[in-house]
Amino acid sequence: MQMNRIGRIQYVEVDFPRSSSSTQGFTTRHEGVSRPPYNSLNLGMNTQDQQATVEGNRSLLARAFGVTQGALVTPRQVHGCDILVINEPNEDFSHFLSVEGDAVITNQPNVMIGVCVADCAPILLLDPVKNVIAVVHAGWKGTAAKLVSKTVAGMESEFGSNPATLQAAIGPCIQKCCYEVDEPVRKAFQQGGIAWDACAESTNPDKWQLDLSAANRELLMTAGLMADEIQLSGQCVCCHSEQFFSYRRDKEESGRQMGFIMLKG
């Protein structure tokens, strides 16, 4: 992964080396039109930023990659396990904005699917054989519920994807250094069958530093992906206020960046 720019959009570009069929990456907070404290490329609809300003930012992102804003699909994220599947053409995809879900799968070209995050892990998936893509919003709740595993299974059942051929990228998110969690989080992971000691480190009594990226990487490998096909950004959004939004750092004054992926037409 490396920082790149297209038009006025600065983003972390992801290269999936076995395919040139998709465009994908993770936005930063730069080169949008939002005013402080949401400056400047705030893409989150559920913030206290001006609605028209967020719409303007989303339009800037879509146009930079050659599509209309109506082809930018982000579901209404609720930290759940519902997956939106788009398997046929639509004249306007904007109606999906009201659909609750925390992951999207599609085989449709020129549809930019994305998830908005401010600490949670954005995860991109590509099947270069079947030409299928997916995007996942993985906070601690989604990770404990194995949402990324369910998304891989959805790609397999809906489109015939083979997990062993998939490529994945886990983008900038809050890292272990800044993510202290408590007993309810540990309990949720253990109930979900996730090896807690492999992704969390005890620091204080009843407190742990959680590594979301590591937990989701393990889930992807358990789902059948090859270890060398999973890229990790390793960038901590909480540490790098100059590049990324972070809800844990900025609370209600935090904007949202986006993980996005699109099949080329």
Image (cartoon, grey):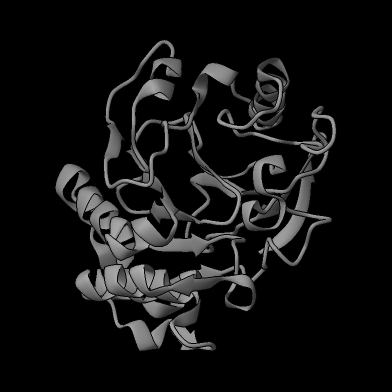
Residue that protrudes farthest toward the front in the picture: 205
Can you say whether 143 is above or below 151 in the image? below
Q: Is residue 224 visible?
A: no
Foreground of the two, 122 or 17: 122
Image location (x, y in percent) of residue 171: 57, 60
Q: Is residue 43 left or right of residue 137?
A: right
- For the point 81% across and 38% down, which residue is it? 37
Give the image location of residue 246, x and y in percent: 67, 54
- Total of numbered circles in the picture? 0
Q: Quadrant of residue 131?
A: top left
Q: In the rendered view, does 35 fall on the left or right side of 25?
A: right
Q: Position of residue 217 (x, y in %)?
A: 41, 73
Q: In the depicted view, which residue is nearer to us: 16 or 59?
A: 59
Nearer-the-camera pick, 66 or 172: 172
Q: Which of the image's four quarters has the N terminus?
A: bottom right
Residue 208 % position (x, y): 48, 81
Q: Quadrant of residue 84?
A: top left
User: Does residue 236 lie above or below 103 as drawn?
Assistant: below
- Residue extending furthest toward the top: 91
- Quick check: can you spot residue 52? yes
Q: Residue at x 53, y 60 (%)?
A: 16
Residue beneath the point at 54% across and 88% down: 203
